[in-house]
Image (cartoon, rainbow, N blue to C red):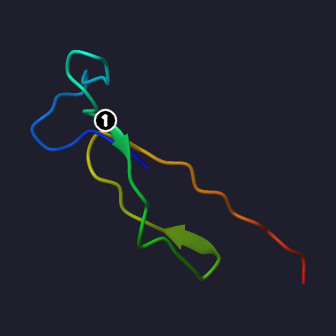
Amino acid sequence: MLHTPDGKDRFATNNLETGEQVGLLPLDGVEAAAGGLTFSLPALSWAVIEVEVTKN
């Protein structure tokens, strides 16, 4: 998950002057049940969730 920490704005970037303001975090709490996925993202976050589908 790519996340902007609390107190930073949506235009925050990583650069030599400001250092690392935006970073990757693990996305915990993804649950698969009843044919769907459930997860929550903090504000100003992006995530990629890979799902492997197999045929029974």
Check disc 1 and report the residue beneath it: 22
11 shown above or below 38: above
Q: Position of residue 34 (x, y in %)?
A: 60, 82
Residue 8, by quadrant, is top left
Residue 12, by quadrant, is top left
| Left or right of 35 on screen, residue 44 | left
Q: Position of residue 18 (x, y in %)?
A: 20, 21
Residue in the image at 21% along x and 15% along y: 17
Q: Position of residue 33 (x, y in %)?
A: 57, 82
Question: From this viewpoint, which residue is outermost toward the front?
Answer: 16
Residue in the image at 59% along x and 71% along y: 36
Q: Position of residue 54 (x, y in %)?
A: 85, 74
User: Is label 1 in a helix, a strand or a loop?
Assistant: loop
Residue in the image at 90% along x and 76% along y: 55
> Mark 1 is on which residue type?
Val
33 shown above or below 50: below
Question: From this viewpoint, which residue is outermost toward the left?
Answer: 7
Residue in the image at 32% along x and 24% along y: 14
30 shown above or below 9: below
Residue 44, by quadrant, is top left
Task: Please identify the quadrant where the C terminus is shown.
Answer: bottom right
